[in-house]
């Protein structure tokens, strides 16, 4: 009997504990249900409002031009592009409601998973935006290529336009997949292989198809170079000839200038040569030297000196002193004494013995006193 009583008390204790747990969980359950209902209702309202707003701003037309409308139609979601974005917004709000509801219910494991998925949702939105922009770019580039190739007279303009569109779409898909983070490495590898295959195919097509054209272009360039070769050689030769003529002319001018410098003022004898100067010119009044030069430098006297300028007359023509009748000064000024003594330099008043200046060390100067 005691065992039955113990069993009954254990049952009652368990039931009481379960009832207490249930009663304590009722507020959480009610909160969970209320949060879900509010989230579901709010998400439905947002879906309808967003879809209506997008339709009023003619988002469907933009989506159709970009190709996003065709993409939505192939998904068989039963709505248009505006409805598709509204549907995405609805489930985004519902996911937020689920995270909050499971947190209120006390199930953090479920709420953590939903939270991670909720944080990933913006990447999905960005990927969709990238696809829309990529579709617009692909459509615009396709039309541009089709028009340009048709204007140029290329027959396969439709193929080239389609190829340009596919390339842009491929790039947009790669960016979208990288944004979502699904098989990033694999998609990047496949995209690089795809681009490499297209580049190789284009290279082979242009290389094999344009071989004859390239040969003609190179041949024309070679012929043009051969035609211009003699002209270039003639021009180079003419330039060299002009340079040589100019150099010769400059050399002759330099020689003429040097000759003029040597012969300016007469052909006087060289310094210390003992040979008198030629081509005498009258001395300057007031004591200048007669003759063109100082008759051989330190050698002979000034031959043919002026009679009124105070120069030495009758000087020796071969140097070595004043020989013959050069013993005095004819009509010398006051600075040239008649006795052959020292004279006063012109304009300075300084005494200067010109006999000592112009006497040669080889033979003393002689004068005739008579």
Image (spheres, grey):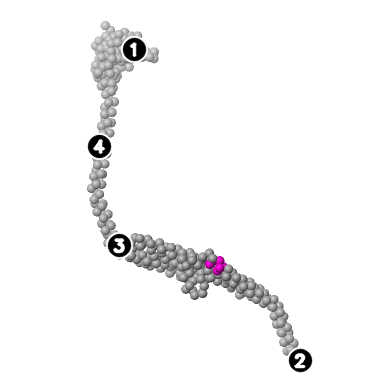
Is residue 52 a member of the stretch shown in magenta? yes
Q: Position of residue 288 (x, y in %)?
A: 32, 15
Q: Residues within 10 Å of mark 1 (few under 14, many from 20)?
A: some
Labels 1 and 2: the sequence-earlier one: 2
- Which element is circle 3 on? loop
Mark number displayed over residue 286: 1
In 3D space, how far apart are the residues under numbered discs 4 and 3 (Cα atoms)?
Answer: 52 Å
Quadrant of the rendering where the C terminus is positioned: top left
- Residue 153 in which image quadrant: bottom left
State left or right for residue 221 relative to residue 26. Answer: left
Above or below — where is 133 with respect to 10? Answer: above
4 or 2: tag closer to the N-terminus: 2
Marks 1,2: beta carbons within 8 A: no
Mark 3 sits on what residue?
Answer: 210
Q: Which residue does the numbered mark 4 point to in the structure image? A: 245
Are the residues flagged by discs 4 and 2 in contact, CB closer than 8 Å? no
Marks 4 and 3 close (CB-CB < 8 Å): no
In the picture shown, does residue 194 fall above or below 18? above
Q: Is the magenta stretch mostly helix, strand or loop?
A: helix
Q: CA–CA distance between discs 4 and 1?
A: 51 Å
Q: Position of residue 41 (x, y in %)?
A: 62, 73
- List the single residue furthest toward the top: 370
Residue 289 located within the stretch drawn in magenta: no
Q: How far apart are marks 3 and 1 (CA)?
A: 100 Å
Label 1's element? loop
Q: Nearer the viewer, mark 4 or mark 3?
A: 3
Q: In which quarter of the image is residue 151?
A: bottom left
Frontmost of labels 4 and 1 is: 4
The x and y percentages for residue 81 are 51, 69
What residue is shown with label 2?
2
């Amino acid at each position: 009997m005691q065992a039955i009583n113990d069993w009954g008390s254990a049952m009652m204790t368990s039931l009481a504990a379960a009832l207490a747990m249930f009663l304590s969980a009722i507020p959480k359950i009610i909160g969970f249900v209320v949060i879900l209902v509010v989230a579901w209702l709010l998400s439905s309202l947002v879906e309808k409002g967003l879809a209506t707003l997008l339709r009023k701003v003619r988002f469907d037309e933009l989506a159709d031009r970009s190709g996003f409308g065709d993409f939505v139609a192939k998904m068989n979601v039963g709505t248009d592009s505006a409805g598709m974005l509204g549907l995405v917004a609805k489930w985004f709000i519902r996911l937020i409601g689920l995270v909050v509801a499971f947190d209120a219910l006390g199930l953090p494991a479920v709420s953590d998973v939903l939270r991670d998925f909720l944080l990933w949702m913006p990447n999905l939105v960005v990927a969709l935006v990238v696809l829309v922009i990529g579709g617009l770019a692909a459509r615009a580039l396709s039309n541009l290529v089709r028009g340009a190739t048709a204007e140029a007279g290329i027959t396969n303009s439709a193929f080239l336009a389609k190829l340009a569109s596919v390339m842009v779409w491929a790039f947009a898909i790669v960016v979208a997949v990288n944004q979502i983070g699904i098989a990033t490495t694999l998609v990047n590898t496949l995209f690089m292989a795809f681009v490499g295959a297209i580049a190789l195919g284009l290279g082979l097509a242009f290389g094999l198809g344009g071989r004859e054209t390239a040969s003609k272009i190179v041949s024309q360039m070679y012929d043009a170079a051969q035609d211009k070769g003699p002209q270039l050689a003639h021009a180079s030769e003419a330039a060299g000839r002009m340079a040589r003529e100019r150099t010769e002319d400059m050399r002759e001018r330099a020689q003429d200038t040097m000759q003029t410098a040597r012969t300016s003022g007469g052909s006087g004898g060289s310094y210390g040569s003992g040979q008198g100067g030629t081509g005498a010119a009258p001395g300057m009044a007031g004591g200048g030297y007669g003759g063109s030069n100082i008759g051989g430098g330190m050698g002979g006297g000034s031959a043919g000196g002026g009679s009124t300028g105070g120069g030495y007359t009758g000087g020796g023509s071969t140097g070595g002193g004043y020989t013959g009748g050069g013993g005095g000064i004819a009509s010398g000024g006051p600075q040239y004494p008649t006795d052959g003594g020292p004279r006063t330099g012109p304009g300075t008043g300084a005494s200067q013995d010109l006999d000592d200046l112009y006497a040669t060390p080889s033979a003393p100067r002689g004068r005739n006193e008579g």
